[in-house]
Amino acid sequence: MTHQNPLQQGIQQSVKSTWQAILALGVLSIVLGVIIAVWPGPTTLVVGILFGVFLLLTGAFQVIAGLLGETQHRVLTVISGALALVLGVSCFRDNVVNSVAILGIWIGVSWIFSGVTSIVIGISDKQLPNRVWVVILGIISLAGGAVLIAYPFSVEVLVLVAGIWAVAIGIVQVISAFQLRSTAKQVQQRVSDLVG
């Protein structure tokens, strides 16, 4: 029977919670994207509400990660999360149809900012595990944001890009979660080997 010291247990629990949270966000993104793709016609209101919830969750996660995290890009992460929170709240406005253009532009700007943040973090943080996925996530966000800014008044483009983006981001998040889990197991094994 292997006994872990309290520090090992704390680290193991933190890593487990982190990869599970990333996995949950990835699955939520995929489900959201599929719902949008399967039910495109009457989804303007539904998309607004679902994206509001999604943006609130991801924004809160980014703000918390930026405030509590150990990364060197905490300010960018907090700003990106704050933008997502503002967008999430704007999705719950009464007049969704009139706010589609504003929502499209704001989502586009948020995705571009989030994409640039992810790309900068992925390229500059040499110790980040699986950082290629962070860069890929950034490129997907950047491209989706550019499309939304180019066509902000089109509900169809907003719904289509939102669905595709949500599925793509979800897939990358699910892959990242399992890679984090695998890396954590390898680190735990190395620590156990060193400790005894």
Image (cartoon, grey):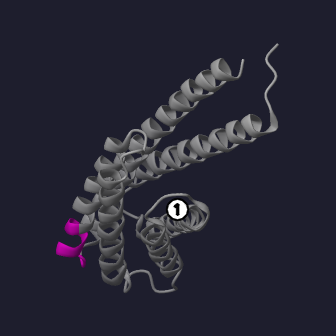
Percent x, y for residue 16? 65, 38
Q: Nearer the viewer, residue 32 or 115?
A: 115
Q: Nearer the viewer, residue 40 or 132?
A: 132
Residue that badge 1 annotates: 58
Say above or below: 109 vs 143.
below
**Is residue 151 something that shows in the picture?**
no
Say above or below: 127 vs 152.
above
Residue numbers of the magenta segment: 146-153
Identify which amino acid the numbered label 1 is placed on. Answer: Thr
In screen coordinates, is 111 left or right of 71?
Answer: left
Say above or below: 171 vs 79.
above
Q: Secondary structure at mark 1?
A: helix
Residue at the image point whose x is 40% and y is 69% from the top: 44
Percent x, y for residue 55? 50, 66
Q: Nearer the viewer, residue 57 or 39?
A: 57
Percent x, y for residue 149? 22, 74
Badge 1: few (under 14), some or many (20 or more) residues near its Cα, within 10 Å?
Answer: many
Which quadrant, please, contains the N terminus?
A: top right
Judged by its main secondary structure, the magenta piece is helix
**Is residue 184 something that shows in the picture?**
yes
Q: Nearer the viewer, residue 146 or 181?
A: 181
In screen coordinates, is 175 left or right of 113?
Answer: right
Which quadrant, please, contains the C terminus?
A: top right
In screen coordinates, is 57 left or right of 31?
Answer: right
Residue at the image point whose x is 33% and y is 66% from the top: 111
Is 185 within the magenta?
no
Residue at the image point whose x is 30% and y is 78% from the top: 105
Looking at the rendering, which quadrant does residue 68 occupy? bottom right
Percent x, y for residue 37? 35, 51
- Number of dots carrying numbers: 1
